[in-house]
Amino acid sequence: MSLMVPEPRVRYDRAVRLWLSATALGLACSGSPAASGPALSPPPAAKVPAPAPTPAPSPDPPPPSAPTAEAPQPLPETACRPLLLAKACVSRAPQDWLDSEALASWYQSRGTKPPQGIEPSCREIVLGSGSEAALWCERIQHESRGKPGTPLHTYRVLTLLSVRAVRSKRVEVLLEAPLRFDVLDKEDLEQGPAFELAVETRSSLTELVLGEPSDGACDEAEAELRRRRAANDPSQVAWARLDEELRARLCRAIGTYVLKGGRLQRVAPKTTASSSSGP
C-alpha cells in the first residue's frame, strides 16, 4: 500500500500552513490541556545521561578515539508508519504536489480562483478516459469538541481526500471523503496517524476504492476506543469519544467509487483495499 507524501518544498509549505492553523487553534484553546489526549500522546523522551568528567591533561598524546555509532537516521518517506489505534501501518509514495503559485495558476488558467480556507496539497490528474484535468487534493480540517479552556476540550486534525474540477469557470467537488485523522500537537513525526484508510485507484481516475489499512482494523480500533471510554478519567473519556466519532466517520466512507455522471459515486459499500494510491 502506498499513500501520498508531499515533495520537500511543498511539504515545507504544507507544514507551515498546518503550524499556522494549529497555532490559531491553540490560541483559541488557551488554558486547555496541552496534550492531545492521554491515550494517544507520544511516549516521553528518554533522559540524557550526564556527561562523563573530563580526564586530567596528560603529557602523552591521547590514543586515537574509537569510532562512534552513527546518529539514528529519520525514517524514509516511504516507510510504513504504525497507526495509533490499530495493528496496521501506512506508507506514502512521494507525489508531485503543486506549490502555492502553481496551484493558484491552475485555477486562474481556468477562469476562477482557489476555494477559500486552508490551502490543500493538490496534484493534477486526468479524469476517466477523456482529457478533463482535475485536482487530487488532501484538505485539512480541524475537529474540536467541548469548551476551550476546560479539561474536556478535545481536538484532532482530520484530512479529507478531495477531487475537484473546474467546469464553466466554477469549482466542482467530485468527491470528498475522510482519509485520516491525527493528533494535533504530535511531537514524534515518525509516528503514523491515529487512523487512516487505504486508497486504491486506476491509472486514469475512473474508479477509486477506500478500504481498511488491514483486515479488521476498523473493528480493532473501535474495540480499543470502547475500552478507553470505560475509563474513570472524564478527560480520557472525552478524547476517546472524539476519536470514536472520527474513526466511525472514516469507516463509513469505505467502499468503491466510480466516475458516473461527472462525479465519483459510491457503488459498493464496505470493501477492504490494501494497494497503492493515486492515478
Image (spheres, helix red, strand yellow):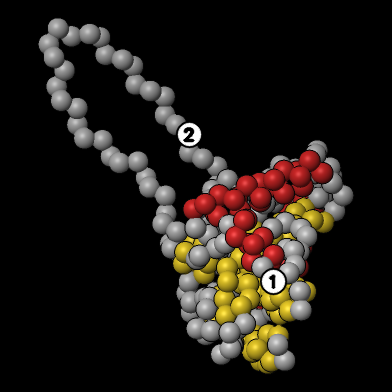
Say which element carries label 1. loop
Q: Residue at x 76, y 45 (%)?
A: 24
Q: Position of residue 28 (x, y in %)?
A: 82, 44
Which mark is drawn over residue 47? 2
Say which element carries label 2. loop
Q: Residue at x 69, y 45 (%)?
A: 20
The crowding category of the residue bearing disc 1, from other C-alpha atoms within 10 Å (few below 14, some 14 to 19, many at least 20), is: some
Q: Which residue is mark 1?
A: 110
Q: Position of residue 130 (x, y in %)?
A: 58, 88
Q: Is residue 111 left or right of residue 124?
A: right
- Residue type (three-letter) at the residue carrying disc 1: Arg
Q: CA distance from mark 1 to mark 2?
A: 55 Å
Residue 194: image quadrant is bottom right
Q: Nearer the viewer, residue 108 or 213?
A: 108
Q: Is residue 183 above or below residue 197?
A: above
Q: Position of residue 9 (x, y in %)?
A: 52, 52
Q: Residue at x 58, y 84 (%)?
A: 131
Q: Is residue 273 visible?
A: no
Q: Is residue 10 visible?
A: yes
Q: Is residue 71 above or below residue 55?
A: below
Q: Nearer the viewer, residue 227 or 179?
A: 179
Q: Residue at x 62, y 56 (%)?
A: 101
**Considering only order in the chain, which callout, 2 or 1, is on the residue closer to the N terminus?**
2
Q: Is residue 168 left or right of residue 191?
A: right
Q: Position of residue 155 (x, y in %)?
A: 75, 54
Instruction: Confirm or deny contact between disc 1 and disc 2 (CB under 8 A).
Output: no
Residue 11: image quadrant is bottom right
Q: Is residue 50 left or right of residue 188?
A: left
